[in-house]
Amino acid sequence: MTFRSTAPVLFLLLAACQAQPETAVGDQIPVRPAADFVGDAVCATCHESEAASYAAHGMANSFYPMSPDRVVETFDSPVVRHEASDFFYRAFREGDRFYQEEYRLEADGSRSHELIREVTHVVGSAQAARTYVSERNGRFDELPLTWYSQESRWDFSPGYREANLRFDRKLTSRCMACHTNAPPVLDGTDQVFEATPLAISCERCHGGGDLHVQARRAVPEPAGDTDPTIFNPDHVELDLRMDVCQQCHLNGAIVVYRDGSDPYSFRPGDRLVDHQLLFEPAHETGLAVISHADRLKQSACYLETLDSPSPLECTTCHNPHADFRTAGNDFFNATCRPCHVGVAQEVPDFARADHVETSDCASCHMQKRQVENAPHSSFTDHFIRASIPADEVESAETVEEPLVLEPVYGEAEPGELAWAYLSYGYARGARDVVDRGLILAERELPWFRAAGNSNAAFTLAKSLLWSGRPQDAVEFFRLAVAADTSDAERLLGLSRALDDLGEQEEANVYYNKAHQSSPRSMNVLKDFANFLIRTNREDGAVRLYSRAVAEDPGDAAAANGLAAALSRLGRVEEALQAAESAVANDPDYVDGMTNVGLLRARLGDLDGALEVLRPAALLGRDTGNLSPILNLGLVSLEAGEHEESIRMLGLMVASNPEQPDMRVLLARAMMAKGDSISALAQINAALNANPGHPAATEIKNLIESR
């Protein structure tokens, strides 16, 4: 979400510390100093058998380069149409390279748009699905089509049928933290990675290994029963073992990170709650794609064995070092039987035949079911119970109830709950949820101001700015920046708030600091460039927008911003090329289409201008963007298309009848058509709104003199 448009239109007539929490560990585990990752290949030099078996595990195949030797799909794919956006997609192969293509068809079958992105990486082991990624300049974009292995078919990636993000869905740190081996992020950005991510590694469950490697190379065996240089889940309490799994296999609608933490900060042996707070809507308690841990913890089998020497937990059934899925149903059922001896005598007579020693326990008591937003795949429900209520199985729609957020684990302070509502609403563009969060936050302002809560203060600041309260936002942006003076997003937020308040000199200082802190951040590049355009520093804007286009050639807003800056400098042909590039990336991008039309008109190509402004005006009317309607009215007037000009400028007048400038333009179009009477009516209305309007007065005198 952005605070303002980062894609200016060329011409509009109307100016439009508390210390980081200490790691909490159990009494049974020695305190381990932080250690860096060494990689699976180093681990395998001593743990060869574990490494070899882990190589077949789904976690070891969670992210990898797309290559011919790992193809499981059918190429070329069938064509899949997204009806709402009218885009067609297909996946295809050319030799040893793989692509996904987007296009649009005209009535005669010809293509009016075509965009191709190469598949460079795969997310998923193909046990349920494989989703595809395209990497450019260290940024990873999810692609629209997924291969659903369980049904051997192509279809839209999860969420794309509901909201088609095309080739613009960035994989962020939050995504990478659970699908990869936590690659380092570059320059403080959330989307540029220093190295190509690898699949989930040994060290995601055992912690960084460099101290362990050094120690064991020096002395092959530890002095005691446990090795203090590496985390071994076998030697710690249950909660710490569960947290290792729960770092990824715990469902929640929103996660917020405590100061000093981020998606990568958790290390095995930490308590997850010391790093993050997880919330979910109270009414959404059903099965989800990653609800394994929270569902298991509702089970009697889990609850009633907590105090036993061998409680039921994730690793009771799931060997993290081997691909357990190939073991067959008997592997899982063997886990159930020791605790349920004689169960056939405890159930009603009609059920006894289903409770013999060879019965498949999991198929009834841990059913596989489909979940929302994960089509063509089924997932095991880890809530173990005697039977599943029929209404739970049959209910496929989310219950429409007022949002009530609850912490997934533990209790939440009132300030933390307000933070959760703000985060949830801001991430989803839900203003009503943000408003509720602001009401809660107003009661907890001392908590948001407290040292150690700067992440929460930053969320509050963003929400206040989005809600049109820049003066209030500045205080909390300053608190957030004071806690971390190198965080580009915090610096950028303060810049935006100061800019909104008209404090452009100070805003410029913080825009520069944000850019120095994160020179590759697309948010910083585009927002800073837009600021420079609005403050008449077009040369600087061209440099920043050019850098943004080089960073992400698929970013239509960056290309369109470059067009605006170049046009302001009189470099019209270059500007047109940039604007057409923006529209090539997004054929429904209204601001880009508008700029293409205006630039063609400036170069004398009025027919070409009208060709693109007409569909832009239709899209603008649907989305509430009046810019293409206004400019179509002006260009059609110049081209002598008087009826069209009158219709478009009439729409502008209807949208704001009290605006005299629009009535003056409409009057000019009517006069060009030869309808002075109608023109005079518009002029009189303009003068009623503004009796001294110069242009209206001049036109009135001209008409009356005739």
Image (tube, helix red, strand yellow):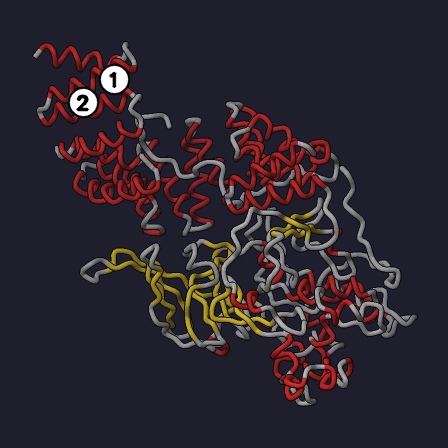
Look at label 1 and name its amino acid.
Ala
Q: Is residue 621 visible?
A: yes
Judged from this view, the residue extending furthest toward the front is: 349
> Closer to the N terminus: mark 1 or mark 2?
2
Percent x, y of residue 650: 22, 30
Q: What residue is shown at x 70% (from left), y 76% (from top)?
A: 317
Task: Describe residue 68's horizontal placement relative to residue 461 as left or right.
Answer: left
Q: Above or below — where is 358 with respect to 185?
A: below
Q: Marks 1 and 2, how far apart in space?
A: 10 Å
Percent x, y of residue 522: 50, 45
- The foreground one among 317 and 706 is 317
Q: Are marks 1 and 2 in contact (CB under 8 Å)?
A: yes
Task: Describe residue 577's horizontal placement relative to residue 186 as left or right.
Answer: left
Q: Secondary structure at mark 1?
A: helix
Residue count near mark 1 (Cα–Cα under 10 Å), binned few <14, some 14–19, many ≥20: many
Look at label 2 and name its amino acid.
Ala
Among the 4 quarters of the image, the one containing residue 559: top left
- The foreground one among 164 and 64 is 164
Q: Secondary structure at mark 2?
A: helix
Percent x, y of residue 56: 62, 78
Among the 4 quarters of the image, the one containing residue 667: top left
Q: What residue is shown at x 17% (from left), y 23% (from top)?
A: 668
Task: Describe residue 188's horizontal placement relative to residue 120 as left or right.
Answer: right
Q: Above or below — where is 197 with respect to 563?
A: below
Residue at the spot of label 2: 667
Task: Describe residue 333's horizontal placement relative to residue 689 as left or right.
Answer: right
Question: Which numbered circle lies on residue 686?
Answer: 1
Question: Which numbered circle lies on residue 104?
Answer: none
